[in-house]
Image (cartoon, helix red, strand yellow):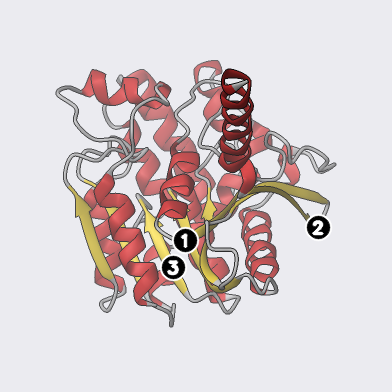
Amino acid sequence: MTRIFSLFFLHLFLSISLHASTLYEKEISIEVKGGHLKGTLQLTADTLNPVPVVLIIAGSGPTDRDCNNPYMKNDAYKLLAMSLAENGIASFRYDKRGIAMSNDFTMTESEVRFDDFVQDAVACIKYLKTDKKFSKVIVAGHSEGSQIGMIACAQTNADGFISLNGAGRTIDVILKEQLASQPKSIKKPSYKIIDQLKAGKTVSDVPLTLISLFRESVQPYLISWMQLDPAKEISELKIPVLIISGANDLQVSKTDAEKLKEAKKDAELKIIDGMNHIFRTGFNSTEENAASYNNPALPISEDLVKSISDFVKKL
């Protein structure tokens, strides 16, 4: 009888534990122009009082709400959301239009413009603002999502903005910097294409080796993106701003964070030692850094979580 009683309570404990691990996650669908954004609302243990919520905006390419894509899995945004929840901060992360579960959009790639992603973020901010569970809405944009987020903040009544490894220079400059170490056979035609796109002109004779980066269908989007200057946009924000950069970021340098800080002098700037583009630390080589992009078991930076939590709680 005692053994049966113990087994019953063990089963009950496991059921409660398993339920608790998913109790505070909620799937959300937000209607926007052309389709629906699917995302995950990560709530905190406090269900009685309003708590701050962070909107996490993903970086470029087919990156989903968890910071994964067909070529890599690292769960960076998912781990960030869980860590913030442990610190009493809710979050909402979503699949961008046309990515993962946000797949009911009818527009083609050639029809997408940078402002479409901005308006999606605006819709998410407005959605969160109407929910009485949340005391404040803070936008955290990662990489490309940083520029999307800062423009969206300027168009809404968000309470704060966080740039996570975001560019401080126009994307044409960043692209050239990222391609600088490539062989001349790649760099020279790439630079020529970038200059034409910057001038607002599409390019029809893209070399086969560069199709994935500069295919004709993505060129209108790149043109729309290249017209925007993140330093100018962040300078126009009237809300508290936190700029975070990883000192070990292989994609966006701390120079960009410093450019953003220079443009927004009252912003907080945090350079996190050892942190890379996807919030991991502790690398002894470039190879280890790159390998972390496909290792979801690695923890994210504690300094990152603390910096964001401290900033949010001060608002």
Q: CA distance from mark 2 to mark 1?
A: 29 Å
Determine contact: label 3, label 2, CB under 8 Å.
no
Give amino acid for label 3: Phe
Left or right, 281 with respect to 312, comes to: left
Instruction: Report the disc number at residue 161.
Output: 3
Of callouts 1 and 3, which one flags the residue occurring earlier in the amino acid sequence? 1
Up-down: is 170 above or below 310?
above
Using the rendered image of the protein, determine whether residue 174 is visible from the camera's viewpoint: yes
SS category of the residue bearing label 3: strand
Instruction: Report the disc number at residue 33.
Output: 2
Q: Which residue is mark 1?
A: 89
Q: Position of residue 72 (x, y in %)?
A: 49, 23
Picture quadrant where residue 242 is located: bottom left
Picture quadrant where residue 191 is located: top left
Q: Quadrant of the C terminus?
A: bottom left
Give amino acid for label 2: Lys
Q: Which residue does the image show at 44% across and 40% down from the upper left?
A: 79
